[in-house]
Amino acid sequence: MGTLVPLATRPLGPLPRAVADVTLWLDCRRTPPEAVARSFAEAARTVGDTLPPVADVTSAGRRTANGTTVAGPVHGPAQFRHLMRRLLSDAMAAPTPGPRDRPGGVAVEYSIPAVDALVNAGLDRIGGCEAKAMRFRAGVAGAHLLYDMLRHDLRSPGWARATARGIPAPYLLWSTAPGAGPDRGAEYAERCLFPGTAVALSPAALRTFVERGSVTGPTALDLVEARRVVGILDWFGIRLDTLVGAQAPTTG
């Protein structure tokens, strides 16, 4: 088994949103209500939207402060394909927006730390140095794969017809909490700044992200390395394609 190449990050420097075409979100879903106003005041000049506190963070049909619907989360390609088919079906069934209508967008959430936690658990059960070396690689690899899948989906005839009717195309939301401290949350964000996507960070992770200086351009898509990670996990019997939340990956 060869040495793994880290998936690409980007050069240091401030993040010009117009260049990277990435929107930062403030993830307050697990922030105490009394601390939300302070967190938003600190981040108001940095973020484009906010995920407000909710009683049940797993509930469907969640909306951001700006009215974007958050679908998912998905944890692997199979879940993503199923959700995209449903979103396209809903888009085709929706009435054509009028000239003054502003249909709300849909962000498909992919939880990077949740994927890492699920895969790490499977690797820990396997044990050994080679399995340990694969910890914390699955989440970012999956993000690269899903971004490529989304680009292909949105070029399909179905989505071309939907967007021609004025239905907004869905986009990916990379969430970096829970399960990731501020440093790892910021690192996840730095590795998933794909054009046309959004990155949600907890208040602490957002502060760390900004303090670290972050980036000057978008993440370079690296499907070769992502597929290599998938292949090695498959060798261990862990199927990233069929990974689902709240369930350990299939091993053996």
Image (tube, helix red, strand yellow):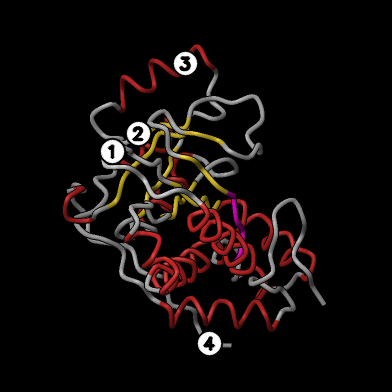
Q: Which mark is residue 2?
A: 4
Q: Amino acid at mark 2?
A: Arg
SS of the residue under disc 3: helix
State the residue position of label 1: 211
Quote the CA–CA distance across marks 3 and 4: 47 Å
Q: Nearer the viewer, residue 11 or 38?
A: 38
Q: Is residue 167 above or below residue 1?
A: above
Residue occupying the point 67% across, 80% down: 234
Badge 2 density bin: few <14, some 14–19, many ≥20, Cα 10 Å: some
Q: Quadrant of residue 116?
A: bottom right
Quote the CA–CA distance across marks 2 and 3: 15 Å
State the residue position of label 3: 35
Describe residue 105's horizontal placement relative to residue 3 as left or right.
Answer: left
Residue occupying the point 69% across, 84% down: 235
SS of the residue under disc 4: loop
Q: Earlier in the sequence, mark 4 or mark 1?
A: 4
Q: Earlier in the sequence, mark 2 or mark 4?
A: 4
State yes or no: discs 2 and 1 in contact (Cβ < 8 Å): yes
SS of the residue under disc 2: helix
Region of the chain picked out in magenta, as a range: 72-76
SS of the residue under disc 1: helix
Residue occupying the point 33% across, 42% down: 24
74 is within the stretch colored magenta: yes
State the residue position of label 2: 207
The secondary structure that most of the magenta stretch takes on is strand
Q: Amino acid at mark 4?
A: Gly
Q: Earlier in the sequence, mark 2 or mark 3?
A: 3
